[in-house]
Amino acid sequence: MQEKKIELNHFEKRFLECDTKFNTIFDLTSVATKIIRSDLTIIKVNRALCELLGYLPEEIEGTKILDHACEEYISHWHHLQEELWSKQVPFFKLQVCLYRKDRTLVWVNVTSILYEDRDHTYGFTVLDDVTAMKAFQDSQKRLNIALKYSGTAIWELNLKNHEVFRSPDHDEIFGYRERQEHWTLENYYPHISAEYLPAFKSAIRNIEAEGYMDVQVKLNRPDGALQWLNVKGKAEYDQNDKPVKLIGVINDITTDKMIERHKDDFISIASHELKTPVTSLKASLQLLNIKQDGISKRVKTLIMQANKGVNRISSIIDDLLNAGKNYQDQLELRKTTFNLYDLAQEISEQFVSSDTQSFTLTGNKDLMIYADSERIGRVLTNLIGNAVKYAPGSAELKTEIQDGQAFVKVSVTDNGPGIAQEKIPLLFDRYYQAVHEQEQYSGLGLGLFISASIIRRHEGEIGVDSVPGQGSTFWFTLPKSG
């Protein structure tokens, strides 16, 4: 009898020790845990659950889990209740949304296990916080929808084996109704028109040297429809600074290309229509220039200025007629030796009409260069005209001519709103127009494109230095000897 009593005491001691261990583990585990009754009343919670929901233990123990459930998920908890306590399923899993004390939301994966304790059945419930994962999934879903409706796909090219990881709608852009099982770099080749395939392959080869690719291609469509893509990507490197993959986007730019084509057609038609009356006006001015008997000096000066203006308009029309992407190669220069300072002064004087702006010109007044004076005058007109148009609040516009050993540098500076850094690489693209805040400006977006083509045809450089809120300096260089 004594031995049986000792054994009973020993069993009770071990039970209490196990109960203590359970409570210690339950309370200190980093996983949010609670114990619920069959009526879904919370009877015990650990620290992790209190931290998860933002309550003290005494604030949440005794409440029902339904008090903390998002309305649309209350039925899920009733389903758990039925499965565990009515159907006696040993464990049950579900994903639900709960309210924290501050009424923010937390998403959890719930696993409940039944266990018996003193003739009662309880649910031991573990809550795994998946809020971040849920947010990521929702973000991914939104991204995929945005990509689908914007005609954009994401691609990732493995530069070692040429395998391509791509977003869900990638294959659809290339005319496939169903997602293809496998895609490599070579899969792009048959879809790209023959005249654009060399440029695409060249862009791929230059990734290691340039660290990125940005190429426009036209597709071969089975239905014959016109489709253009802009394929972009930026390289990622390993620890040895060797590019291992390219991550980027593929944009459907067909609409932009069609708009560009319509602009080209309009400019071509308008330029042709303008050429005839301008030619007639030019002939009339030439006759006036010949027959100057009895004409005052002032009128002679006006005729001379009108002739220069008409010649400049003729040059602009010629530029517009040929303002395609290969404009620079088509451009024929008529070079002469002329005074650059005098040309800059003549152009500047055309804009001296504002009481609120002052114009200054500095540099070597005797600087002679060998170039196409009409074309360089066109560049100066564009740069100064842009400064007047895009920086109307600029009190002072400065034109500076710097005389170098082999090159000259011409700068036009304003103290207007400046240009955002991400827009600067686009400024010299055809048809691009920078927009400041909500202001809209007239024009075709060809001025800087044509100016850049003229300067590069002269083997010079053109660029801009700008800080938002502090103004801009557009500049170009020219070789002195041509």
Image (cartoon, grey):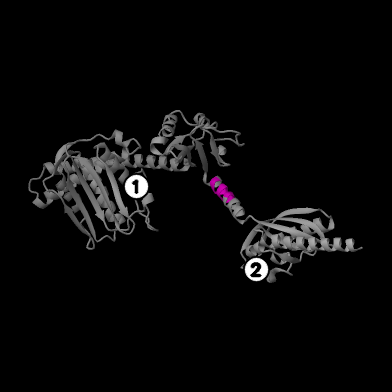
- Judge from the rendering whether residue 232 lies leftward or rightward of residue 319; answer left or right: right
Image position, residue 335 (x, y; %): 18, 36
Residue 224, percent from left and from top: 52, 32
Q: In the image, is 359 to the left or to the right of 221?
A: left
Task: Please state which of residues 228 and 14 is positioned toward the viewer in this rendering.
Answer: 14
Q: Quadrant of residue 72?
A: bottom right
Q: Secondary structure at mark 2?
A: loop
In this picture, is 272 found above or below 120? above
Type of amino acid at the residue the image marks with label 1: Leu
Quadrant of the image containing the C terminus: top left
Taking the spot 18% from the left edge, 56% from the top edge, the residue there is: 360
Q: Which mark is residue 55?
A: 2
- Residue in view at x 84 percent, y 58 percent: 86
Which region of the structure is painted magenta? 140-147
Find disc 1 in the rendering and name its residue: 427
Q: Specify whether 151 is left or right of 271.
A: right
Residue 245, position in %: x, y?
A: 48, 38
